[in-house]
Amino acid sequence: MPQRLSFLGTSLPYPEARVVILGVPLERTTSWRGGQAQGPNALRAASDSVEFFSHHFRRDVRDARIADLGDLDPYRSVEEILAEEEAEVERILRDGKIPVVLGGEHTVVIPAVRAACKFGPLQVLALDAHSDLRDEYLGLKVCHATALRRARELVENLVVVGARSFFGPDLEEPCFAGPKDFAQKLRPDLPVWLSVDLDFLDPSLCPGVTNPEPGGLFWPDFLGILRELRRFRVLGMDLVELAPIWDPSGVSAVCAAKALLEAIAALWA
Ligand SMILES: [Mn+2]
């Protein structure tokens, strides 16, 4: 029997799926220590350790009918990879399904949001330790440090929760919110794209990320955010910046797998 690593061991064919996972192991514009290319498969492997059932949301995630398409080929130019990702996310949405993009660096949010915008006005909720609002970084307009600025240019509204690393002027931006009050900054009339940079979590909980930042959020904050988000229509999500090589305990990959499971249980099961 051919074996392929998949989230929760799913082998559901694409036509039968409601939630569709796509790995984009992009690691090209990283400015420090890297490691995100191994994120998608580390998350898949760690998903063996979590139950299908979310007791917080009283849902079995298998009811979300999850398919896992595997990873895009990363051995091409950044432009080619991002273009294929955009086409894939667009196809998944056009088929009436929910795309879940696994990074890779946070740059992968840009083509995902660009694809989702083709279906109407959109807003983005990002969980991130960093504002990612630079206009360019190290000469690049499209990279991990500009990801949320590029995404914001595409959508009607951006809200960022968990930010605690700023370069200065970004601190004056109106998009930042706390885990308890963020929903007030979201527009009730617009669908949401959820972008989860795992470094929003405190590094004591999830150290295996490319740019850990002290003073982060904890698990109950995340569950509370998901609970609030259930009032909105969430079109899809990305989960990025898992860098398992920096966490020999493997707990960060389990956090990532569990975070994805809880998000699917809360929003789509
Ligand atoms: Mn970040």
Image: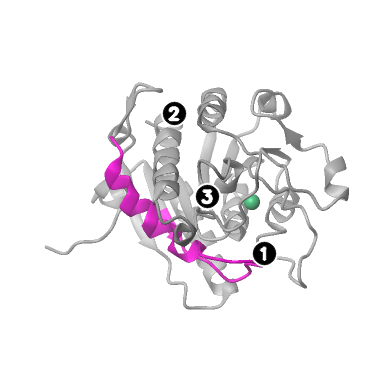
| Residue 48 horizontal side relative to residue 83, left or right | left
Reading the image, the residue beneath label 1 is: 143
Mark sitting on residue 249: none
Reading the image, the residue beneath label 3 is: 207
The answer for how far apart the CA atoms under marks 1 and 2 are is 30 Å
Amino acid, disc 2:
Ala
Where residue 107 sits in the image (x, y, percent)? 61, 60
Where residue 133 sits in the image (x, y, percent)? 76, 52
Q: Earlier in the sequence, mark 2 or mark 3?
A: 3
Near mark 1 (Cα within 10 A), the count class, few <14, some 14-19 or many ≥20, is many
Amino acid, disc 3:
Pro
User: Which of the colour schemes (rainbow, by chain, secondary structure, one colour) is used?
Assistant: one colour
Q: Nearer the viewer, residue 143 or 92?
A: 143
Q: Does the stretch in magenta take in 50?
A: yes
Q: Secondary structure at mark 3?
A: loop
| Residue 227 horizontal side relative to residue 164, left or right | left
Q: Is residue 16 visible?
A: no
Residue 101 to residue 55: above or below: below
The answer for how far apart the CA atoms under marks 2 and 3 are is 25 Å
Amino acid, disc 1:
Cys
Q: Does the stretch in magenta take in 7?
A: no
Does the numbered disc 1 mark a residue whose Cβ is under 8 Å from ligand 1?
A: no
Q: Earlier in the sequence, mark 3 or mark 1?
A: 1
Where residue 41 sits in the image (x, y, percent)? 37, 59
Which residues fall within the magenta stretch? 22-51
| Residue 180 horizontal side relative to residue 14, left or right | right
Near mark 3 (Cα within 10 A), the count class, few <14, some 14-19 or many ≥20, is many
Reading the image, the residue beneath label 2 is: 266
